[in-house]
Structures are given as structure tokens and as C-alpha cells.
Image: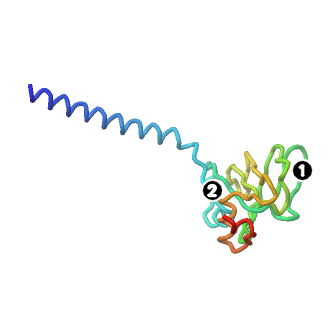
Amino acid sequence: MKGLKKKRRIQVVLVAFVALILSTALIGYAMRDGINFFRSPTQVLAEPPKESETFRIGGLVEEGSLERGQGEVIRFNVTDGGATVPVSYKGVLPDLFAENQGMIGTGKYVNGVFEASEILAKHDEDYMPKEVVDALKEQGVYQETAEDTKG
């Protein structure tokens, strides 16, 4: 009887281990398309991603670069102070989107142009996404305000 209980316990442990490995593999497979890495313009130009890779880019909309073309296509440049990447976007921009303001775009880098599928803009006068602030600080462009130091 003792040998049968021991065998059954080993079988249960093995089945649980296989189920754990299988569930981990399925979660990883499901998330492969759902993860979008953030990059600054400097990082994009230093190591251009594959044309098939979807990622997020963020920085400031360069002053004087916003062009509203024929139809819905909008072109502008995003900069972090160290590098500038041209962006094209087909759609309606958020109401608060403006030059010299923070933005994050999701899309692909194709032939030297970031083709955005989604654009996010700041939502109040002082807000800028953390990733954009970190990238601008890295380039020495971002100046902290009194509100930033309050914590």
C-alpha cells in the first residue's frame, strides 16, 4: 500500500509540473504581440527596430514640424533633444496635441519614418508620461518644475 501512495504522489507532482510548464508557455505565447516596448528617438536611431516590430516612441513634438497634409495624414517630428524621428499618422489627433508638448505614439518604424497607429498626448498643463520625462532627462533637455520636486 505504501508503494502505491508514493507512486500516486509522484504522479500528481509530475502532472502539476507539466501543467505549470504548459500554462507558462501559453501565457508567454499569448503576450508576444501584446508587449510594446518604449523607445526614445535617440534609441530608435541608434538601434533601428525591425519593420515588423510594434513599439512606442515618445518625446516632444518638434516646433514647426507639424504638417497637416491632404486627407487624414499628419506628419511631424518627435524629438528628445538628442535625436529627431519623423512621424506619420493617419487619423484624428487628440485635442491637446500641440507642438513643444509631450506625446507617445504606438506604431512601426518603416523606411526611416515612424508610422503611428495611435497617438497619445498630455492630459493637462504639467503632465508628461514618465517614459518621456526619463528620456528627456537622459538627454539633458528636461527641466524640473517646482511641482516635479514636491513628490
Q: Nearer the viewer, mark 1 or mark 2?
A: 2
Q: Quadrant of the C terminus?
A: bottom right
Q: Residues within 10 Å of mark 2 (few under 14, many from 20)?
A: some
Q: Please give the residue where the numbered disc 2 appears in the rendered image.
A: 38
Q: Residue furthest bottom?
A: 140
Q: Residue at x 65, y 71 (%)?
A: 138
On screen, residue 56 versus residue 7, left or right, reads right
Q: Please give the residue where the numbered disc 1 appears in the rendered image.
A: 69
Disc number for residue 123: none
Label 2: state its secondary structure. Answer: strand
Image spot of residue 15 (x, y percent): 29, 32
Looking at the image, residue 85 lies above or below residue 54: below
Looking at the image, residue 96 lies above or below residue 147: above
Question: On the image, which quarter does residue 130 sit in?
Answer: bottom right
Q: Residue at x 79, y 49 (%)?
A: 89
Amino acid type at image mark 1: Gly
Q: 42 or 128: which is nearer to us?
A: 128
Q: Residue furthest front?
A: 150
Q: Residue at x 89, y 43 (%)?
A: 71
Image spot of residue 126 (x, y percent): 78, 60
Amino acid type at image mark 2: Phe
Image spot of residue 143 (x, y percent): 74, 72
Q: Residue at x 71, y 66 (%)?
A: 148
